[in-house]
């Protein structure tokens, strides 16, 4: 069973939205956790499989939305080179699109510098940051003024 940590109805809605999008993730695990917190400019979303976030052999991701930009703060995929990273990026894009973000940014290290260009991210000039433009939905109705 997926555990959801959310303090408000708005946070719970975003967690449910992320969980709904996760149904397409190839490594989705019912023994996982989602935490959502709303701040003044957007949302923080954390997802991890298993009981603890400190296991390097599990899948985890930390996201932040600020106004119309979504940020991938950290990403770890338990099984690499099998398409699972691309699958999780698709979940991230759907979630950020639903939160009205028009682009996703990531500042990768290590293997991420090779991964992000393969999944449609372009390097920003004079920066170690990568960006992917996403098309926002034409119509969207959601509670809580998301």
Image: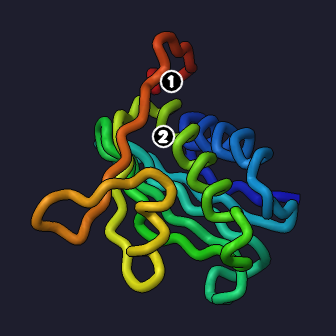
Would you say the residues marked 2 and 1 are in contact, meaning their CB atoms lie under 8 Å apart? no
Q: Residues within 10 Å of mark 1 (few under 14, many from 20)?
A: few
Report whether 123 appears left or right of 114: left
Name the residue beneath numbered marker 1: 144
Q: Please name whichever residue, 27 or 64, is drawn nearer the observer in this view of the structure.
A: 27
* Rendered residue at 69%/41% (across/down): 21
Q: Please name whichever residue, 79 or 40, is drawn nearer the observer in this view of the structure.
A: 79
Q: Secondary structure at mark 1?
A: helix
Report whether 121 appears left or right of 53: left
Residue 11: image location, x then y, percent: 56, 42
* Rendered residue at 10%/66% (across/down): 126
* Rendered residue at 71%/87% (across/down): 57
Q: Residues within 10 Å of mark 2 (few under 14, many from 20)?
A: many
Q: Quadrant of residue 124?
A: bottom left
Q: Is residue 138 above or below residue 34?
A: above
Residue 96: assigned label: 2
Residue 98: image location, x then y, percent: 52, 30
Does label 2 or label 1 sit earlier along the sequence? 2
Front label number (2 vs 1) = 2
Q: Is residue 51 above or below residue 70?
A: below
Residue positioned most to the left: 126
């Amino acid at each position: 069973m997926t555990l959801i940590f959310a303090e408000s109805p708005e946070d719970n809605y975003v967690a449910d939205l992320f969980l709904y999008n996760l149904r397409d993730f190839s490594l989705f695990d019912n023994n996982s956790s989602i935490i959502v917190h709303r701040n003044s400019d957007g949302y923080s979303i954390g997802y991890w499989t298993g009981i603890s976030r400190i296991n390097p052999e599990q899948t985890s991701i930390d996201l932040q939305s600020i106004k119309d930009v979504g940020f991938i703060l950290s990403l770890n995929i338990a099984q690499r080179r099998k398409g699972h990273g691309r699958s999780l990026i698709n979940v991230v894009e759907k979630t950020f699109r639903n939160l009205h973000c028009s682009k996703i940014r990531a500042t990768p290290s290590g293997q991420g510098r090779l991964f992000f260009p393969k999944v449609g991210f372009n390097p920003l000039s004079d920066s170690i940051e990568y960006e992917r433009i996403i098309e926002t939905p034409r119509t969207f109705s959601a509670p809580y003024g998301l």
